[in-house]
Image: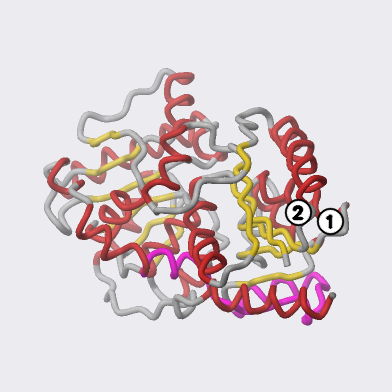
Amino acid sequence: MRIAVIIGTRPEIIKMSSIMREAANRGLDCFIIDTGQHYDYEVSQVFFETLHLPPPDFHLRVGSGTQGQQTGKLLIEIEKVLLTEKPDVVLVQGDTNTVLAGGLAASKMRIKVGHVEAGLRSLDRNMPEETNRILTDHLADLLFVPTPEAKENLKKEGILSDRIFITGNTIVDAVLQHRFIAEKESHILKELHLSKSNYFLSTVHRMENVDCRERLVAILQSFQAITEQYGVPLVLPIHPRTRKMLDTFGLEIPAQIIAIKPLGYLDFLQLEANASMILTDSGGVQEEACILQVPCITLRDNTERPETVRVGANIVAGVQPEGVLTGVESMFSVSRDWANPFGDGKTCCHILDIVEDSISHQK
């Protein structure tokens, strides 16, 4: 059995790290394709080094472009590798252009496709991620869903139950495997002169937020209002896309914000674990905050992680200062004893068990 793991962004590296390790532990023939969708070294390659993962076998270096340009380049370059390497199954994770291109290339070559973190829905077709996840789910052979809610989403769309497997989410594996390493190895709190539970942490990178001047201005206003009201710092690692759009729009980050370069995973995990609250438009960060028992404010009008809202770990607040401030005030009063809805931390084992069984029956 030959497995291809296709990744291209920081969240995909993190969420697939446990699968890569478990495949190596089992002695499986597994190779890694890094598409280079995140073309900035600081948000891609550094994660392989930080997480002590084997380097990718293939670097495609596709880089940026419009949605169509990037997806097309990804499809062409991924197909070239699959034609020569001939895997039995391709594993993709999440909702990026890398995921859609990888799944589509494999499906057209009649290679079995496994979609990790399948079944998520924001119900907002304005998001390119929503298009990517829907199309990938419908072409995949094995759909590894994190929760029962995600399974129900797929069944409503007519996907057969025998293709759907509730496995939990590999983000739990990653957080549990790396949290204590982060506590020992990361010195980010000291470097930024922060005290535990006495700062806010934020990430902003979604296209619908940073490519829209009005929404980006509202987010910056929200950050300024929060720091003024609560008198504690807000740490903001600046994503390359966000930096580009700030420059394009001629916007400046408020002086009260601690704006820093993108971080390695262990440093970021340490910041997450010790924040008083997290404000984000990232789906993965919503999950990590929930697992770490840190209250979360989602800077969007919807979320494909409704489980985090259901258990009381998250509020979808939009981007306007009034809504964000109301959300922050509300989340300060919640008890941090919610149940983690994303699995037992052994998702990688469940997924590879299913993959091995499926391929053995196929042969």
Q: Is residue 270 above or below residue 168?
A: above
Q: Quadrant of residue 235?
A: top left
Q: Main secondary structure of the magenta part?
A: helix
For residue 261, side relative to residue 68 (left or right): left
Mark 2 = which residue? 103
Q: Quadrant of the C terminus?
A: bottom right
Q: Quadrant of residue 185?
A: bottom left
Residue 227: x percent and y percent?
21, 43
Q: Which mark is residue 320?
A: none
Mark pair 1, 2: CA separation: 6 Å
Residue 193: x percent and y percent?
11, 43
Residue at image position (44%, 69%) is 173
Do we see residue 225 in this rendering? Answer: yes
Pointer 1 with pointer 2, Cβ within 8 A:
yes
- For this rendering, which residue is in front, 168 or 47? 47
Q: Which residues are magenta?
A: 148-176
Residue 8: x percent and y percent?
58, 44
How many C-alpha atoms fall within 10 Å of the one at disc 2: few (<14), some, or many (≥20)? Answer: many
